[in-house]
Image: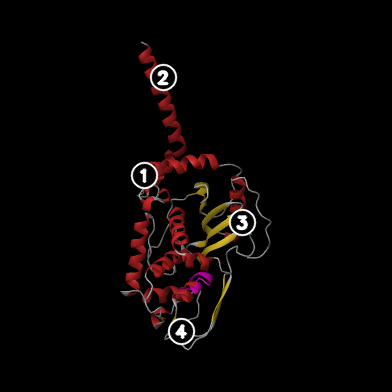
Amino acid sequence: MKFFTYLFVTLFITTVFLTGLWFFYGKQLLHSSQINSPIPSFLMLSKNNQATLLDFWLPMVKQIQGSSGALPDLTAQSVLMYDLTDNKVLYEKDPYVRRPMASLTKIMTAIIALENPKPDDRYIVTKNDMVTGDLMGVTPGEVYSLQDLLYGLVLHSANDAAEVLASNYPGGRSAFIKAMNNKAKALGMLNTNYTNPSGLQGDGNQYTTTYDLLIVTRYALKHYPLFAKVVSTVTYKIPATNEHKEIDLSNETNLLTSYPGVIGVKDGYTPEAGLCLVTLLNYGGHKIIGIILNSQDRRGEMKTLLDYSLKSVGVSPPPYHAGQ
């Protein structure tokens, strides 16, 4: 009789525990499965992106421990704040919903270019690289280095720099875009699609999620020191040579000069995507990546989210200075 009593109590406690887990995470997991992600892509960040049961549960347990304070009031349609130091989500809003990414596309563009450098480091500009939007100002016939184009790609969000990198890829622009999508799949970015190297709208169904953007940003920062250096740069001068003109570049959108501890990464905008921003903060012993898509005030809202994130890990936010 005692055996059955113990068995009943054990089953009851287990049922209550599992019901509680479903209450907290069932909706999230159901939503994830509805967008063809049996395991949320954000959790596929370790062991060469091969998710294990531990990878799946541990971040969610840490998320409970890290959630505190009043949630910020935001216009951004999707948000993700992630603490790289403690490996936990600090805040999220529709992190699995597919949305246009504008020039945040260029994070993947930089990765493909860095993984496939030309042996002679000579990137020739062609007339097909002449596009609209934010431009570095290159001219057909000029020749630039990979490093110079990366600074233009990131600091000035130059669409022409993106096209030059793509057209100089083995197999050309179409092969470059295919490589972008193949890399996304390899990283476990299950809800991302690229149709061009710049993020300009109008030539296909280009989309991502804040969780997928976390994956690609974390990968780029971890594996490519040059990328980390470029995204943390405020101004950069490309000196004139006998093969190209002098170009002055400046990073005009992120909080690099106005929020202490911010060290990159990338902004984006199209009418379709709205104001987008990925920001890396290193402050108070914590490295935090913030991602917002389709905001009406990306800088102001990122500041609010960084303040909130620091408070949630027990760190007082730094003084904020007007500026970028």
Q: Which residue shows up at 44% across the image and 52% down it? A: 97
Q: Position of residue 69 (x, y in %)?
A: 61, 43
Q: Amino acid at mark 3?
A: Lys
Disc number lying in front (3 or 1): 1
The magenta stretch spans which residues? 151-159
Give the class, few, some or many, for how many residues have Cα within 10 Å of label 3's Cα (few <14, many ≥20): some
Nearest to N terminus: mark 4 or mark 1: 1
Image position, residue 237 (x, y; %):
56, 78
Q: Which mark is residue 273?
A: none
What residue would you read off at disc 1?
Answer: 52
Q: Residue at x 38, y 67 (%)?
A: 115
Q: Position of residue 272 (x, y in %)?
A: 47, 63
Using the image as rendered, state which of residue 114 and residue 156 is in the foreground.
114
Above or below, comparing residue 19 to residue 316 in the picture: above
The vertical placement of 161 against 216, above or below, is: below
Disc 4 packing (10 Å; few <14; some 14–19; many ≥20): some
Q: Helix, strand, or loop for circle 3?
A: helix
Three-letter amino acid code at disc 4? Thr
Task: Quote the CA–CA distance across marks 4 and 2.
Answer: 76 Å
Quadrant of residue 129 within the rendered picture? bottom left
Report the residue that reaches farthest toward the left.
171
Q: Amino acid at mark 2?
A: Val
Distance in Å between CA atoms under marks 3 and 4: 37 Å
SS at badge 4? loop
Report the residue marked by disc 3: 303
Mark 4, residue position: 139
Q: Is residue 32 above or below residue 201?
A: above
